[in-house]
Amino acid sequence: MKGRKWTNNIGLKIGSLVFAAVMWTVVTNLNDPLDTRTYDNVPVRILNGHIIEDSNRVFAVLENTDVIDRVTVRAPRSVISMITHANIVAQADINFISSLDTVAITLGVNNFTAAEISDIDGSSTILKLSIEDKRERRFPIRAMTEGTITEGYLQGDISIDPNSININGPESIINSISYAAARVDITGFVSDISTTAPVYLYDVEGNRVVSDRINQDISNTSFRVPILETKTIPISYSVSGNPPQGFRRNGIQSISHSEILIAGSSNAIRNINEIIISPERVDISDSTELFVAEIDINAYLPHGVRLVDMSDHIVMITVGVEAEVSRNISLPEERLRILNMPSGFQASFLDFTETSPFILVGLRRDLNLIEEEEVYGDIDIAAWMGSRGINQLTQGYYELPVTINMGNDINVANVVTVWMNISPIGGY
C-alpha cells in the first residue's frame, strides 16, 4: 500500500491554517489589542547638513518645520505602553533635498521593530530650508562710552584688546552689519577704568543685529579708559626785538587765548602752573607789517598731559608793526618861548615870520592827533651856552636851536634854528 501524499485533502489543510491564523489574531487582539498614542513637539534631526556647508553655503529652517507638532503611533497595547517621547525619531536627510529646498521627513520608533509598529504618522512631513551663500567679514571694534563723567575730570584715550572681530554667517545677515562696538559706563568714575565689555554688532542705523546664525570669534574685549584730572593754567609771553629802521610797533598786541584747560593724571599736572612762551617765538626784529606768531601749545606740555579741547592747541600772538610817516609843522613867533636867558640880557628875532618846518616822524595815527596851535617851540639859552662851552654871554647875533617836545611816540627828524639878536637890557 503506498504512503499517503501531503497533498491529500490540501484544501482542508489550507483552511485549517487560515482558521488557525484568524483564531490567533482574534485571541491576540482580545488579549493585546491595538492602541494609539500621540507625541507632541517631536524634533527633526537633520542628516548630512555638511553637504550644504561644504559648498560654502548655510541653511536655516523655515516656519519651524524642524519640529513636528504631533506624531501619532498605532501599536499593540503591550508595545505602545513602552514607547516614550524619546523613542520617536524624525529625520530629514539632506542627500534627498528637492529643487525647492525641501526634504521629506521620515518617522520611526527606536528600539522597536517595524513589525511591532502598526502605523506612525506626523502632522507635518516636509522640512523647509532657506539656503544662501556664507560670508565672512572682519570689523574693527569701536570703543565707546556712555554716561556722564564727573565734573573736573576728562575721559582719556580708550584702549581695547582685542580691537577687531571676525564673523561669519548668512550673506544677507552679514551684509546688514555696519560696525562692531563695545561700550562701558563712565558715570561717577574719578580713576582709570579697567574692565571687560561685550562686543555687539550694529546696522547702519545703530540698531543691534542679533542672530544665532552669526558666528563670532570673540564675544568680549578688555577695556581700559583713563580718567584724567583737569586744570586751568594761564599762558604768558613777552615780545623781543625791534622792527627795522623806518618801522615801529603800533601798540596792537593780543593773544588768542590767555589760558588753557589741560588734563592728565594728578601727579602729571600738579606742578604745572603756567605756560611760558619764550621771547624768541615772538621776535619782531625783521617785521615790517603785522606780526603773527602761531604757537603750538602741545610743544609746551610734558608727557602724559594733554589739552581738554584739542582745537585750542594753536595760540595766535599778534603784534602790530607799521611803517613810520612824517608830517611838517612850522611855528610862528608867538609860539616860540625863550627859556633860561642870563640875567641882564634880552633877545629879539631877526626878520622872522615862522620857523622852517619841523619834520615829525611817527605813526600816522599819532601824527593825525597833533593840533598845530597847541605845539610850542623852546629856545633854551642856558642849554645852548652849555653845549658850546660859553660861560659868559655877550652881545651879538646868534643862530639858536628850537626844540619841541612831542613825547615818546613822535620823533623830530631835523634841527630847526632861528637867528636872534641878544643884547644887554637897555643896550643897543
Image (spheres, rainbow, N blue to C red):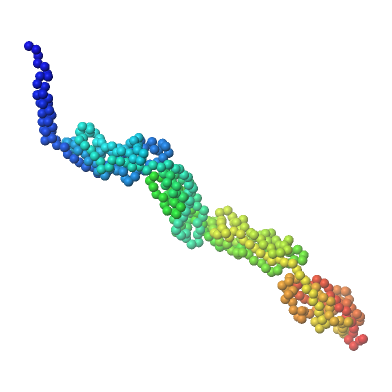
Q: Is residue 325 left or right of residue 23?
A: right
Q: Is residue 92 left or right of residue 397?
A: left
* Residue 363: quadrant of the picture: bottom right
Furthest toward the bottom, the residue is 426
Q: Nearer the viewer, residue 299 or 288?
A: 288
Q: Is residue 49 left or right of residue 418?
A: left
* Residue 38: quadrant of the picture: top left
Q: Residue at x 78, y 80 (%)?
A: 376
Q: Residue 204 in the image: state x and y as whole percent.
A: 46, 52
Q: Residue 374 in the image: state x and y as whole percent.
A: 76, 80
Quadrant for the C terminus, please. bottom right
Quadrant for the N terminus, please. top left
Q: Nearer the viewer, residue 320 or 264?
A: 320
Q: Residue at x 10, y 19 (%)?
A: 8
User: Is residue 115 positioned above or below 141 on the image?
Assistant: above
Q: Residue at x 40, y 38 (%)?
A: 53
User: Is residue 49 positioned above or below 373 on the image?
Assistant: above
- Number of residue marks: 0
Furthest toward the left, the residue is 1
* Residue 360: quadrant of the picture: bottom right
